[in-house]
Image (spheres, grey):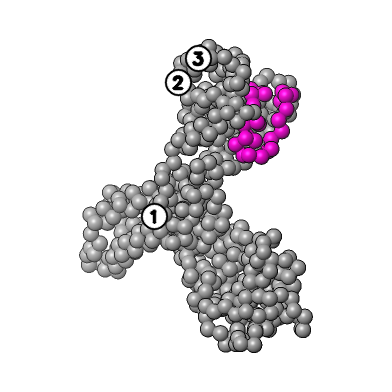
Amino acid sequence: MNRQDIFISRKNVSLQQITEDTMINQDTICAIATAQGGAIGTIRVSGTKAIEITDKIFTPTHKNKKLTEQPAYTISFGHIKNDNEIIDEVLVSVFRAPHSYTGEDSTEIMCHGSSYILQQVMQLLIQQGCRTALPGEYTQRAFLNGKMDLSQAEAVADLIASSSAATHRLAMNQMRGGFSKELSDLRTQLLNFTSMIELELDFSEEDVQFANREDLRNLADQIEHVISRLANSFNVGNAIKNGIPVAIIGETNAGKSTLLNVLLNEEKAIVSDIHGTTRDVIEDTVSINGITFRFIDTAGIRETHDTIETLGIERTFKKIEQADIILWMVDSTDARMQIEMLSPKILPLCKNKKLTLLFNKAEYIHENLKSELTRLAKQLNIEYIFISAKNRDNISELENHLTKTASLPQISQNDVIVTNIRHYEALTHALDSIHRVQNGLQTNLSGDFISQDLRECIFHLSDIVGEVTNDQVLGNIFKNFCVGK
């Protein structure tokens, strides 16, 4: 099968077909939408019979109407009952299609946060015809009912998982449709030219030209610039979303694990005076000044005959290659010897990295030695900080240094930055297609080939927002959501 056949077969997979064949589900679903342990718990119900089913277990106070008689956006007070037994006093919100999160009739039952009460209410709903919602099914229904596009739906999961101001801003911007609007503008322009070129093909015998090639060349250059900018933003977006990788390296007993525990503010790594305690890589993330860092504590670098420790040291060198920032910790009392011994191994690996020397255990050295180590760091042209991980001295200075070293741009809610690997892959495919369009225009390629490449670019842009996709992609996206969202 050639590239054109593959494209045509993929192009024929439309959202309408997916919806009709596999995705529409008329079941009414329910799920606990709040975490356990709170004072208040919320159960969400959505589907064609959501209000009717909730009405069967809800008894309003004597002044209130039944839920089926209530207008949208109202809250009713009453009781959830199992026969004549009162389970709890509750508030029930009513939403009517299409003006709800899912686009369906929906209710939200707010009760006390007792796990027993929540489970009792869930059981009553299931007995009346609900089924338990799958992970992400509410957002999936919102997508299928046109309440949001696929990139906005994916942003819901990012918003829930946001752990810093930057990740929150990016998720909110994507949910508000900033990314989708930029792609929609590109698609509209591409579709206009594609239709013109295909109209030419219908009149090929008359040798007419409806699409101005110079205008198309300018448009292709403009679109190539926008797609390249979006694709290139993934490096920043990925760092913001998943954390900037910071490897803490050095000899054994330099204080790496102690520093990791201090930065994370928890006893994550075992600290011991015994050399070679850390034999594997330990990772965790923490937000510092609004930026997420992924700290990696590595095995101490030294000559050893221990097979397991040797494997740990090999992983240390791999983590150096993967990290953006390297913190090289040395024991200040033995710093010169450690630096001379490890420099040939470490410096070549850190050539394109942001390397900082951390002179640990600084409380044990005198001013003359401190001045000597300062000169040594300057000779090597490496930034340095004197710290005491054990006493937490200069940790704030280190955190500020990390924030500065990260060099992330200021993110506003209007910035369009790609954080999703699926979006990045689609953009790279779209970029390949628009490059073929540019080459085709430069070499006066036949209009039918240019049209095919334009349509491939449109396809990949449409794939991001879910206008053309398949059920396997949708399944992979929504299965990672939490239940109740």
- Residue 303, picture quadrant: top right
Residue at numbered disc 2: 381
Residue drawn where x is 50% and y is 66% of the image: 13
Name the foreground residue: 311 vs 41. Answer: 41
Residue drawn where x is 69% and y is 60% of the image: 37
Which portion, as a residue range, is magenta?
251-276
Q: Amino acid at mark 1?
A: Asn
**Is residue 201 something one can see in this rendering?**
no
Q: CA distance from mark 2 to mark 1?
A: 38 Å
Q: Position of residue 354 (x, y in %)?
A: 48, 30
N-terminal of the pair, mark 3 or mark 1, is 3
Q: In this rendering, would 411 be left or right of 125?
A: left
Q: Amino acid at mark 3?
A: Ser
Residue at numbered disc 3: 371
N-terminal of the pair, mark 2 or mark 1, is 2
Q: Position of residue 261 (x, y in %)?
A: 65, 35
SS at circle 2? loop
Query: Does residue 53 sit above or below 379 in this rendering?
Result: below
Name the foreground residue: 146 vs 433. Answer: 146
| Main SS category, magenta section | loop
Which label number is shown at residue 414?
1
SS at circle 1? loop
